Image (cartoon, rainbow, N blue to C red):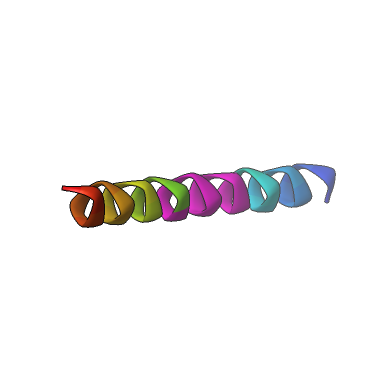
Amino acid sequence: MAQMRAERHVARLEDVRLRARRSCSAVAEIAR
């Protein structure tokens, strides 16, 4: 059960990282 929660937490971190990278690239496109 704890392992499942940890995996879900990791998945959420990955999602946040991808979203942050996407927004950063979008900002770079606008700045260009």
Is 30 situated above or below 14? below
Q: Is 27 or 1 nearer to us in this picture?
A: 27
Q: Position of residue 9 (x, y in %)?
A: 69, 48
Numbered marks: total: 0
Q: Name which residue lies at 66% across and 53% down.
A: 8
Q: Is 27 or 9 nearer to us in this picture?
A: 27
Q: Main secondary structure of the magenta part?
A: helix
Q: Name which residue lies at 25% across and 46% down.
A: 28
Q: Residue most toward the left?
A: 32
16 drawn magenta: yes
Q: Position of residue 20 (x, y in %)?
A: 46, 49
20 drawn magenta: no
Relative side of 28 to 18, left or right? left
Relative side of 7 to 24, left or right? right
Q: Residue most toward the front?
A: 31
Q: Name which residue lies at 41% across and 49% down.
A: 18
Q: Residue most toward the right?
A: 2
Relative side of 9 to 21, left or right? right
Q: Name which residue lies at 50% across and 54% down.
A: 15
Q: Position of residue 13 (x, y in %)?
A: 59, 45
Q: In the rendered image, which quarter is residue 21 located in?
A: top left
Q: Position of residue 12 (x, y in %)?
A: 61, 53
Relative side of 6 to 23, left or right? right
Q: What residue range appears in magenta?
A: 11-19
